[in-house]
Amino acid sequence: MKKTPAGLLAICGLVLAACQPAGGLGASGAAARGASPFAPSGPVDAEDAVDGLIVGHRLMAAREYELALKAYLRAASQHGATVDVLSAIGSANLRLGRLGQAETILRRAIEVDDRFVPAWNNLGVVLMERGAVAEAAEVFRTAFALDSGQTDAIGQNLRLALAKRGEPDYDPPKESEFSLVRRGNGRYLLLTNT
């Protein structure tokens, strides 16, 4: 067997090193620039952090409800107990089957802002799951009214709740247009134009 001269091995090593990215064998572009190829560790600056609500919404869409809940809790520490955060936490608990916690948090969200449609709708879903059909129908009715009937899912939820309650299907009048007439001292009377 013929021995390989040491000079030939040295040349092969130099050729291989020249083919590698800057920084030597196995160094990635990030590592060559001084960054670690691993996930960052330690504290994260507030300006570098991604909003927990956005992360939570993406995780909910990916059906990662436990991780979404953690992201929403992080958002609560960043933003406080806003109606958006509370509603999101309640929705994650609903998806996890924690109906008691979901109901409590969604009711708190409504206390913060009683015009926030998603909180009303999700509370209705929780109440339906818990068997409180009559209250769920009223909650869906409130959500439908606040939404002005623009979201089909809320209308379907209301119809389902009314059907389970044994009432006829709710169908808002389509021919009538409503107008508000002032009655003094800030009171309004709802009239139909038919």
Image (cartoon, helix red, strand yellow):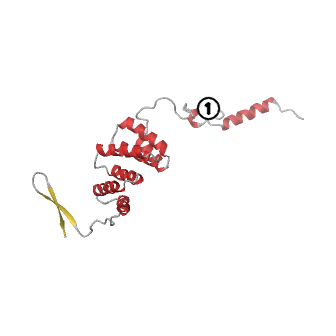
**Relative height, residue 180 to residue 29 (above, below):** below
Rendering quarter of residue 35? top right
* Label 1 sits on residue: 23
Please state if 21 lies on the left or on the right of 166 as rendered. Answer: right
Local crowd size for mark 1, using a 10 Å CA cut-off: few (<14), some (14–19), many (≥20): some
In the rendered structure, the answer to whether residue 139 lies left or right of residue 186 reads: right
In the rendered image, which quarter contains the N terminus?
top right
Q: Quadrant of residue 55?
A: top left
- Identity of the residue drawn at 61% across and 32% down: 23
Quadrant in the picture for residue 152: bottom left
Could you say where residue 59 lies in the image, as x and y percent from the top left?
47, 46
State the residue in front, 123 or 36: 123
Instruction: Using the image, determine if residue 177 lies above or below residue 32.
Output: below
Element marked by disc 1: loop
Question: Which of 86 and 51 lies nearest the eye of the viewer?
Answer: 86
Residue 143 screen position, x and y as percent: 31, 55
Q: Residue at x 33, y 64 (%)?
A: 167
Give residue 31's position: percent from left, percent from top: 58, 33
**Residue 41, placed above or below residue 91:** above
Spot the residue most to the left.
184
Q: Residue at x 41, y 51 (%)?
A: 130
Q: Quadrant of the C terminus?
A: bottom left
Reply above or below: 4 against 136: above
* Left-right relation of 143 to 99: left
At label 1, the amino acid type is Gly
Residue at horizontal 33 percent and vertical 45 percent from the top: 107
